[in-house]
Image (cartoon, rainbow, N blue to C red):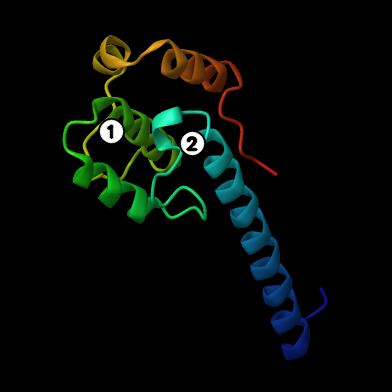
């Protein structure tokens, strides 16, 4: 077995960190692009550049723009389904009842793409 020198370990850690940050960046761009499919998220804070916390706050502040709130909930749940978002949990039935044709088409497109954000 070969033991790594301290410098090699640091170099490996640096490469792994860079790869992780590049993958994360691609993920963020993917989520921003998918959020952009919903017209109500067109000018949403936190979409571009991607910042899930800002999108959550934006959706809470909207109040009664339910198309946008449901779109934000959908995107945020896909970003991190184990986190409890302030804007609430996505409910497909409720969202589909209030979304217009364009929003329903956007979610259909995203779901059929399986929301694949991997690099």
Label 2, secondary structure: give it. Answer: helix
Q: Is residue 36 left or right of residue 58?
A: right
Name the quarter where the N terminus is drawn. Answer: bottom right
Residue 104 falls in image quadrant: top left
Q: Are marks 1 and 2 in contact (CB under 8 Å)?
A: no
Looking at the image, residue 67 lies above or below residue 31: above
Residue 23: image tag: none
Q: Which of pointers 1 and 2 lies earlier in the amino acid sequence?
A: 2
Residue under label 2: 35
Q: Residues within 10 Å of mark 1 (few under 14, many from 20)?
A: many
Q: Nearer the viewer, residue 72 or 40?
A: 40
Q: Position of residue 65 (x, y in %)?
A: 24, 31
Q: Residues within 10 Å of mark 2 (few under 14, many from 20)?
A: many
Residue 4 falls in image quadrant: bottom right
Q: Is residue 19 left or right of residue 93?
A: right
- Residue at image position (60%, 48%) is 29
- Residue at image position (52%, 35%) is 36
- Residue at image position (52%, 55%) is 49
Looking at the image, residue 53 lies above or below residue 65: below
Q: Position of residue 76 (x, y in %)?
A: 38, 40
Instruction: Find the distance from the CA under tag 1 to the CA under tag 2.
Output: 12 Å
Residue under label 1: 69
Q: Nearer the viewer, residue 110 or 44?
A: 44
Q: Is residue 28 left or right of residue 5?
A: left
Label 1, secondary structure: give it. Answer: helix
Q: Position of residue 46 (x, y in %)?
A: 41, 52
- Residue at image position (67%, 75%) is 13
């Amino acid at each position: 077995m070969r033991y790594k020198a301290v410098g090699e370990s640091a170099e490996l850690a640096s490469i792994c960190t860079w790869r992780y940050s590049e993958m994360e960046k691609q993920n963020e761009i993917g989520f921003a692009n998918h959020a952009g499919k919903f017209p109500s998220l067109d000018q949403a804070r936190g979409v571009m550049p991607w910042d899930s916390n800002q999108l959550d706050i934006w959706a809470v502040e909207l109040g009664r723009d339910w198309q946008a709130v449901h779109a934000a909930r959908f995107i945020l749940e896909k970003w991190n389904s184990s986190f409890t978002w302030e804007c609430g949990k996505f409910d497909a039935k409720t969202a589909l009842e209030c979304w217009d044709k364009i929003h329903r088409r956007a979610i259909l497109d995203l779901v059929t793409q399986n929301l694949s954000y991997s690099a």
